[in-house]
Image: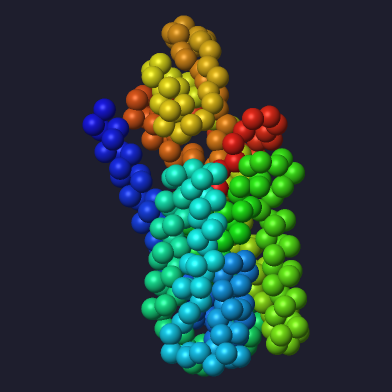
Amino acid sequence: MQNTKKLDYKRILKQYFIILVGTFIFCFGTNLFIVPANLYNGGVVGIAQLIRTIMTDFMGMSKDIELSGIINFLLNIPLLFLAFSKISKNFFIKTLFSIVFQTIFFTIIPIPKTPILEDVLAACVIGGVVSGAGVGIILRASGCAGGIDILGFYFSSKYKNFSIGKLSMIVNTVLYAICGFMFNIETAIYSVIYIIAFSFIIDKTHLQNINTMAIVFTKCKDVPQRILYDMGRGVTSWNGNGAYTKEETLIFITVISKYEVNQIKEIVYEKDPKAFIIFSEGTGVLGNFEKRL
C-alpha cells in the first residue's frame, strides 16, 4: 500500500513539474516572438493582451511592467470558479497552478524592444511552434492552461456535439476582427497565421482526443479495481484460459485517453509484471464515456 502511495505521489509531482515546464515554454514563446511583433494570442490570453494594449496605448499607463499576465489571471477567476464547482477539484488545482505561473512568467520574462525575427511571418510560425508545444505539454500532463479551454471542456462534457475547437474558433474570430478594426488588417492576418501554427502543434503534442482501448490479460484479480478507483475508468472483465498453458487468466477491457496509457501501464505492471496488454488507438466510443482534458 505504501509503495502505491509513493508511486502516486511521484506521478503527481511529475505531472506538476511537466505543467510548470509547459507553462514556461508557452509564456517564453509568447513574450519573445509574438508580443515584440505586435501580434495577439488566441483566447483569454489574447483578450488580456488586447486590454493591455488599450491601457498602455490609449489610456497612458506605463509600459515598464507587462500587464497581460495579471489581466489574464483576473479574467480567469470566474472560469476557475466554474472549474472548481462544475468540473473537478483536481482539474481546478492543476489549472490554477498553471495560471499562477503564467502570471509570473508573463511578468518576469523580458520582452525584446525590437523583434528577434524581422520577418513577421517567421515570428508567427516560430512563436506558434514554441507556444503551442508549451500548451500541448500542459495538456499532456492532464493539466489545462485555463481560459476558454475551461469553458470548452465544461460544455463538451455536457453536450455531445460541442467541442473545444468550435468555441475557440468563435472567440478567436471575434478577437481578431477587433484587432483588425482597432489596428490594421495585417495584424489580424498574421495573428491568425500564428494561431493556426499554435493549434497545429498542440494537436501534435497532446493526446487528449485520442481514445485508446486497452485489453489486459493478467492473473492478478486486484488490477481492475485499481483502474476503477485510481483512474475512474469503467472496466469489463471475464475469465479466459490459455490455449497452450490451460491456465485460467483474467481478461478485462477499458477505454482511456491516450495520455492515460502510461498510468494504466504503471498500475498493471506494479501488480503483475508478466501481464499482457493490447492497446488499440483511435477507438470510436458511443455512450457514457468521460472526456478528460
Q: Is residue 139 above or below residue 49?
A: above
- Image coords of residue 63 (percent x, y): 48, 90
Please report the residue visible at 43 percent of the width from the left and 70 percent of the height from the top. 103
Number of disc labels = 0
Please report the residue visible at 46 percent of the width from the left and 82 percent of the height from the top. 66
- Residue 149: image quadrant is bottom right
Q: Nearer the viewer, residue 151 or 58?
A: 58
- Which corner quadrant holds the N terminus? top left
- Residue 211: image quadrant is top right
How has the structure been colored for display?
rainbow
Name of the residue lying farthest toward the left = 2
- Image coords of residue 41 (percent x, y): 60, 73
Q: Nearer the viewer, residue 247 or 63?
A: 63
Please report the residue visible at 47 percent of the width from the left and 91 percent of the height from the top. 62
Please report the residue visible at 54 percent of the width from the left and 66 percent of the height from the top. 75
Q: Is residue 25 visible?
A: no
- Residue 9: image quadrant is top left
Q: Is residue 159 visible?
A: yes
Q: Nearer the viewer, residue 210 or 111?
A: 111
Q: Relative to 117, is 220 on the left or the right?
A: left
- Image coords of residue 80 (percent x, y): 50, 55
Q: Is residue 163 above or below residue 102?
A: above
Q: Is residue 55 above or below residue 278?
A: below
Q: Is residue 7 above or below residue 14?
A: above
